[in-house]
């Protein structure tokens, strides 16, 4: 998704691009299993601006792609997003950013939340616990403090189709694709990238190479020998998302809202087929399984993680029907040290990276394409990105985004939640 978005923006600037992927088609990487939630609940102003600009690409998807009418487009489902509060004064910093940036939001009382979602239990149930903790089954500790609702948030119904849409637009703009061809090395000489070497030995020469390898980003950065020049690095993290039927009395697909609930350590999303998807909010008590080899990890649903996530959800939605066995997806996040992406150049001239998407950058693909193309164009024209990071202006929102916030050389973003919330 990210590689296709960058290729489209570069083609539209007059570059000739080639997307190389070891998979058989575009979007078959971690993107295929994305929940594709579009929300703005980040911890820093630049991340919020990036997401708000990204949302406008989805709202204008067909006109952005400019492919004409007879296309099966991915759809944006605008169902809204709730941040369930942990305390009455929760997320003040984020709300201050929302106000200054212009993100539409409402603060809901517990009563309003329960009136809108009557299947919800109104107790906090904080903090998140593991299923084998005896306190897991305790009753909720106190009433919920309410929620923050962003009405224009939503999700993209089919991330694979969205990537195919992008690929078609890249082709229409003159870009090319090479599938089933693993990159095995990065060619370099005299301090500059010279292209890539494929696993079958073929060399493809280019003065510009962009690492958009998702959970393999650290592998490709090591091929290029650029990791030492990064103060923020990336790693692959195994994650599971489970699918459950909606409660009988309430159609979550039709009337549900995406919700991030740090009280119980999960997020939920309406899913096609009147289901609910439930993912991890990365609470500290959960084990993090870091993957050394992204080609080799357990793609089966783990009973412990499944039970933990679905029974956490049953605390918020007690009427949720729980099947006997787990259904869902297992895939990898490409996690940066502070869970904030890296959109930057590298210490090797001509080698760029759009990595560390940390489980939350599908929503931003359109913006990332435009930002990376501007950054690449500027650096190739002699701009010193490390000394003076670009101020990128969003095409739709006209918001100024400081690309220094996504530098590989930044100090750790201590405002981060160090979780998928960013
Ligand atoms: C379970 C899950 C849920 C998520 N939910 C959300 C969400 O709700 N909202 C959101 O905004 N984001 C979400 N994300 C994150 C989002 O999906 C990712 O940030 C985004 O899809 C990453 O896209 P990408 O193109 O960088 O990576 P990928 O889609 O993984 O693509 C990378 C490509 O690089 C190729 N590649 C790697 N190494 C090589 C090599 N050596 N040679 C050739 N090809 C190579 C791979 O084959 C792959 O096709 C989620 C992610 C997961 C896993």
Image (cartoon, rainbow, N blue to C red):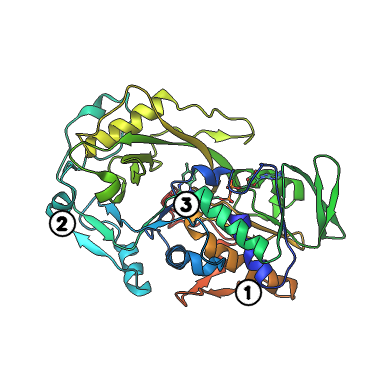
Label 3, secondary structure: give it.
loop
Q: Mark 1 and 3 residues: CB-CB less than 8 Å, in contact?
A: no
Q: Nearer the N terminus, badge 1 or badge 3? A: 3
**Ligand 1 closer than 8 Å to label 3 CB:** yes
Mark 1 Cα-neighbour bin, 10 Å: few <14, some 14–19, many ≥20: few
In the picture, measured across the screen, residue 222 lies left or right of residue 254, that is right
Residue marked by disc 1: 388
Residue at x 59%, y 55% (from the top left corner): 2
Q: Nearer the viewer, mark 1 or mark 2?
A: 2
Alpha-carbon span between mark 1 and mark 3? 26 Å
Alpha-carbon span between mark 1 and mark 2? 44 Å
Furthest-bottom residue in this view: 398
Q: Whole-percent x and y of residue 224? A: 76, 50
Residue 106: quarter of image: bottom left
Alpha-carbon span between mark 2 and mark 3? 27 Å
Q: Taking 136 as reference, is 187 above or below it? A: below
- What label sits on residue 360 in the rendered view? 3
Q: Whole-percent x and y of residue 333? A: 53, 43
Q: Nearer the viewer, mark 1 or mark 3?
A: 3
**Residue 194 at least partly seen:** yes
Q: Mark 1 and 2 residues: CB-CB less than 8 Å, in contact?
A: no
Residue at x 74%, y 75% (from the top left corner): 382
Residue at x 69%, y 72% (from the top left corner): 377
In the picture, measured across the screen, residue 226 lies left or right of residue 40, that is right
Q: Taking 334 as reference, is 11 above or below it? A: below
| Total tally of numbered discs in the picture | 3
Furthest-top residue in this view: 324
Which residue occupies the foreground of this view, 267 or 180?
A: 180
Label 2, secondary structure: give it.
loop
Q: Nearer the N terminus, badge 2 or badge 3? A: 2
Q: Whole-percent x and y of residue 294? A: 62, 36
């Amino acid at each position: 998704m990210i590689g296709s978005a960058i290729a489209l923006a570069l083609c539209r600037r007059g570059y000739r691009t080639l997307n190389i992927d070891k998979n058989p088609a575009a979007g078959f990487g971690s993107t295929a299993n994305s929940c594709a939630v579009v929300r703005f609940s980040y911890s820093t102003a630049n991340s919020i601006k990036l997401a708000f600009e990204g949302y406008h690409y989805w709202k204008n998807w067909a006109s952005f792609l400019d492919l004409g009418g007879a296309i099966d487009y991915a759809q944006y489902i605008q169902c809204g997003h709730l941040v369930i509060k942990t305390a009455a004064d929760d997320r003040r910093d984020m709300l201050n950013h929302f106000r200054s940036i212009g993100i539409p939001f409402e603060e809901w009382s517990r009563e309003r939340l329960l009136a809108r979602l009557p299947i919800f239990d109104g107790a906090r149930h904080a903090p998140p616990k593991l299923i084998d903790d005896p306190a897991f089954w305790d009753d909720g500790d106190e009433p919920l403090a309410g929620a923050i609702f962003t009405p224009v948030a939503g999700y993209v119904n089919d991330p694979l189709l969205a990537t195919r849409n992008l690929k078609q637009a890249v082709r229409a703009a003159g870009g090319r694709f090479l599938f089933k061809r693993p990159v095995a090395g990065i060619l370099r000489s005299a301090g500059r990238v010279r292209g890539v070497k494929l696993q079958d030995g073929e060399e493809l020469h280019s003065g510009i190479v962009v690492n958009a390898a998702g959970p393999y980003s650290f592998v490709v950065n090591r091929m290029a020998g650029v990791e030492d020049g990064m103060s923020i690095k990336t790693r692959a993290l195994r994650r599971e998302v489970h699918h459950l039927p909606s409660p009988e009395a309430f159609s979550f697909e039709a009337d549900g809202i995406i919700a991030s609930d740090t009280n119980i350590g999960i997020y939920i999303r309406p899913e096609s087929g009147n289901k609910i998807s439930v993912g991890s909010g990365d609470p500290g008590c959960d084990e993090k399984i870091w993957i050394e080899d992204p080609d080799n990890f357990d793609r089966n649903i783990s009973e412990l993680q499944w039970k933990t996530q679905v029974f956490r959800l049953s605390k918020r939605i007690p009427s949720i029907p729980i099947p006997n066995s787990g259904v869902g997806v297992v895939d990898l996040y490409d996690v940066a040290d502070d869970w904030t992406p890296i959109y930057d150049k590298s210490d090797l001239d001509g080698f760029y990276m759009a990595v560390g998407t940390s489980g939350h950058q599908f929503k931003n693909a359109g913006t990332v394409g435009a930002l990376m193309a501007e950054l690449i164009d500027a650096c190739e024209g002699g701009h010193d990105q490390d000394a003076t990071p670009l101020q990128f202006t969003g095409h739709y929102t006209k918001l100024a985004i400081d690309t220094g916030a996504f530098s590989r050389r930044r100090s750790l973003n201590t405002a981060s939640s160090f979780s998928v919330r960013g």
